[in-house]
Amino acid sequence: MADQDQAEIRLIVARLRQEHEDYDAAINAMIQTGCDMLRIQRMKKKKLALKDKITKLEDQIIPDIIA
């Protein structure tokens, strides 16, 4: 993979990580204020989807090493 492609993926991963942290903060705030559990579950699902996307992108950067 070209260095430029890796740099672009790393930039996307950094943005997604920040968004993941934002979801975490929002979920914690919703829990503290006693928000509807259905809304909290939806936020957690979105947060998990972001984590999966981050993992897939990181797998593209880091090559598989067969031991």
Image (cartoon, rainbow, N blue to C red):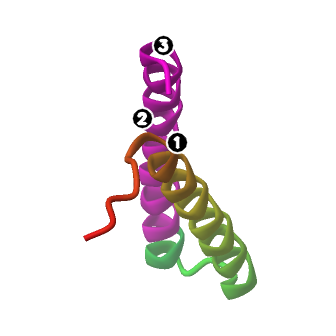
Residue 59 spot, x, y in % from top left: 47, 53
Whether tag 2 and tag 1 are in contact, CB under 8 A, the answer is yes
Residue at 51% x, 67% y is: 27
- The quarter holding residue 61 reads top left
Query: Circle 1 sits on which residue?
Result: 16
Label 1 is placed on what type of residue?
Answer: Leu
Residue at 59% x, 57% y is: 50
Residue 45 spot, x, y in % from top left: 67, 73
Residue at 67% x, 64% y is: 46
Query: Circle 2 sits on which residue?
Result: 14
Q: Is residue 43 left or right of residue 4?
A: right
- The quarter holding residue 47 reads bottom right
In the rendered image, residue 45 lying in the magenta stretch gets the answer: no
Label 3, residues with CA under 10 Å away: few <14, some 14-19, many ≥20: few
Query: Which residues lie in the magenta part?
Result: 1-29
Looking at the rendered structure, the secondary structure element under dot 3 is helix
In the rendered image, residue 12 lying in the magenta stretch gets the answer: yes
Query: Circle 3 sits on which residue?
Result: 4
Disc nearer the start of the sequence (1/3):
3
